[in-house]
Image: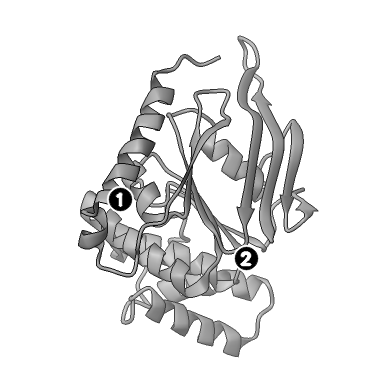
Amino acid sequence: MISICVKHLNKRYRARDGDVVALANVDIDVAEGEFVTIVGPSGCGKSTLLYILGGFIGADGGIIEIDGKAVTGPGIDRGVVFQEYALFPWLTVAQNIRYGLEVSGASRQRCEETVERLVRMIGLQGFEHRFPRELSGGMKQRVAIARTLAYDPKILLLDEPFGALDAQTREVMQDELLRLWQATRKTVMMVTHDVNEAVYLSERVLVMSQRPGRIVQEFAVTIDRTCEREITVLNDDFNRLRNEVWLSVRRQAGARGV
């Protein structure tokens, strides 16, 4: 079943020196439970595409559907995780995770059970009553992901979710996201500049062109993720695919925008 359907998507922005075409004739289908990542040069429209799918901005043409229904605005069927943690600084870890459930009118018992389950899932037992200022960057992003998972969206939209983290924490969070996806089998669409991250996490990697962005190449990822990270990233198949994706992005980065 197709979860995300994008056909002939176009988006332009008004500017003082003329219109800027951000996206042109973008076509993407994402199956239910699939993990798809988009990579491409800076400014190619990756985040714009994600914001359109999230319902935060509108398109100028084309079809944008979630489970067969047109996207007309934000919805609880889609959870969005941004590069910045976007936590409420005056709320504790537990309160941040519980926030969406409380707004939706969930019972106190459901809120407590969900918070307990997610805190355990993200490995932050003992930090439930800490405030964001008392957490590391990796901890904050784990809370942001847990808050999104709390109201059980069918789809996760991830915009450079680990871009602000140091290299070591980023790898830990990638492993955490992979574990969460394998446990929940949510439909995931992520955008990133990190080719290693894209290949390590995804079932498919889509390469976007220079602006105006469009999908120019697709790579299926069939690597074995049942083993340790070190074994996966040192595997010849992983490195061969990573190099192919990197070269594709490199060619697009060197192309002139239209």
Q: Residues within 10 Å of mark 2 (few under 14, many from 20)?
A: many
Q: Is residue 206 above or below residue 61?
A: below
Q: Is residue 156 above or below residue 242?
A: below
Residue furthest bottom as drawn: 109
Q: Earlier in the sequence, mark 1 or mark 2?
A: 2
Image quadrant assignment for residue 133: bottom left
The image quadrant where one finds the N terminus is bottom right
In the displayed structure image, the side of residue 161 where residue 106 appears, left or right: right
Residue 253's x, y, as percent? 40, 23
The residue drawn where x is 64% and y is 48% is: 29
Residue type of the residue flagged with mark 2: Lys
Q: Secondary structure at mark 1?
A: helix
Please name the residue that numbered disc 1 is placed on. 238
Image quadrant assignment for residue 230: bottom left
Depth-wise, is mark 1 or mark 2 nearer the camera? 1
Residue 39 visible in the shown view:
yes
Image quadrant assignment for residue 26: top right
Checking the image for residue 154, the label placed there is: 2
Residue type of the residue flagged with mark 1: Phe
Total label count? 2
Q: Is residue 181 above or below residue 119?
A: above
Please tell me which residue lies in front, 196 or 193: 196
In whole angstroms, how far apart are the C-alphas of marks 1 and 2?
29 Å
